[in-house]
Amino acid sequence: MDNDSTYSGYSYKSSHSRSSRKHRERRDRHRSSKSRDGSSRDKSGLQAPGEPLLDAESTRGDERDDNWGETTTVVTGTSVDSVSQEDLTRITKDLEDSTPLHCRRYLGLTLAAILGLFAFVTPLAFLALPQLLWRDSLDPCGTPCEGLYISLAFKLLILLISTWALFLRPPRASFPRFFVYRCLLLALVFLFVASYWLFYGVRVLEPKETDYRGIVGYAASLVDALLFIQYLALVLLEVRHLRTAFCLKVVRSTDGASRFYNVGHLSIQRAAAWVLDHYYSDFPVHNPAILNLPKSILSKKTSAFKIYSLGEENTTGNSTGQSRAMIAAAARRRDNSHNEYYYEEAEMERRVRKRKARLVVAVEEAFTHIKRHQDEPAPSSPKHPREVMDPREAAQAIFAPMARAMQKYLRATRQQSYHTMESIINHLQFCITHNMTPKAFLERYLALGPTLQYLDHGRGRQWTLVSEEPVTSALRQGLVFSLKRPDFSLVVNVTPLPFLALGEEFVDPKSHKFVMKLQSETSV
């Protein structure tokens, strides 16, 4: 029985190994066919717009330290799946940017709009209810009521326009806590309207007041109160924080990029939103591919030596000298890492300058192949007929000669994850349509732009505010908070602006008099 079980296990292993070997052979043939297809497509010139700019063959390159780190091949027992790191990052962002975030984004605005509409309709209801319920018993009002009608109408119009201009704007950020001043103002409006309705029900509706002029004046007083509340909201929400009081130092945790901003009296969460607004336009895009040292330096390990004296006594002096020399050489190799890093950086800069020059020349030559078509007929040679193309076709036509240089430059500067072939052609089409020069076209690729340039405007960005103080607290000296993302964070340090003491010194204009100092050697 044991022999049978042993034999059956061996046969299973051998058959499994044969099947796995056949599977590997089929996979290798499939890869070789794909590489031949890729090489033939590269020889043909222009790729299809849906394909990535850098294919598998071109990314191998001639540089051993250009690690793209963008595509990971996952090999299982039954299949080979190619999973892109960009796809994984995109899935994570889609999970973060979920639907409840958009619901919270408009919840506060909806509640404020409902309360504002109720407060706006209340004075009109005060005027309409007596006319509908006991119109026959009302005292005639005459000219004074007509003047109050005109005043009330213009006040309501001013209130409506100013509310629309100041407050009916879509929010640009969702906060973890309520905005204290806004909640206080909404509570104040609710208390005013509720108290006016309570007094109106007790003094007007219940006894069926016949003095209509007093009712109109009562409604006009509510509109005046709403205008004063709106002025208070303008001061607290829009004017109070305009006077600068603090300096914020914002540092990105990965690469140390920093900026300084002056802000006014804000809460922590509003200061965080203010920092993020300026982060997307002021900070260069975060590129994790250029943060680490080259792998050729990090992977090098200095070998350790263990010296054993196995010889005779007369060779003790020679072995000791050799061991000391070997240990000193190992220490020198260990201390030469900074030199290797220096030469690696110099080589990288040289390679980037070389590929930048090739890219500039290729783009300049490609732009010389097209020109804007004029409406008047131009003489053309029958041997070389001119074909009229739209901007999209022209962009695809001149992209072919510059594609290889663009590939190599983006790979050398680690920008391949931000520019696809479709985006480059679209940008080239935009430049051709607006008569932009080759330098204007290359401006996007020669240097990393702001974060907003590479941002997907269709979705928001989820940040986590980390603070030891409540986020509704005001800024103060020495406060530190951070804004975290999955791959990096922004650390914000708060410093109050110094008090400036200016003195005055009067200078008499007649005191500006001078004399010449003459010496024997002077030529004057």
Image (cartoon, rainbow, N blue to C red):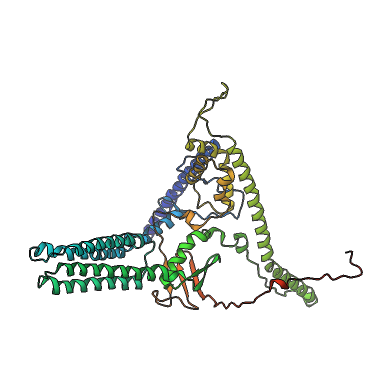
Q: Is residue 177 visible?
A: no
- In the displayed image of the protein, which residue is found farthest to the right? 520
Q: Give the percent coordinates (x, y) of residue 300.
A: 63, 63
Q: Which residue is at 23% across, 62% downward?
A: 147
Quarter assignment of residue 405: top right
Q: Which residue is at 78% across, 70% downward?
A: 514
Quarter assignment of residue 303: bottom right
Residue 240 or 384: which is nearer the viewer?
A: 240
Q: Give the percent coordinates (x, y) of residue 337.
A: 66, 65
Q: Give the percent coordinates (x, y) of residue 428.
A: 52, 42
**Is 190 drawn above or below residue 449 in the view shown?**
below
Residue 20 or 150: which is nearer the viewer?
A: 150
- In the displayed image of the protein, which residue is found farthest to the left? 136
Q: Give the percent coordinates (x, y) of residue 353.
A: 65, 51
Image label count:
0
- The quadrant in which the C terminus is found is bottom right
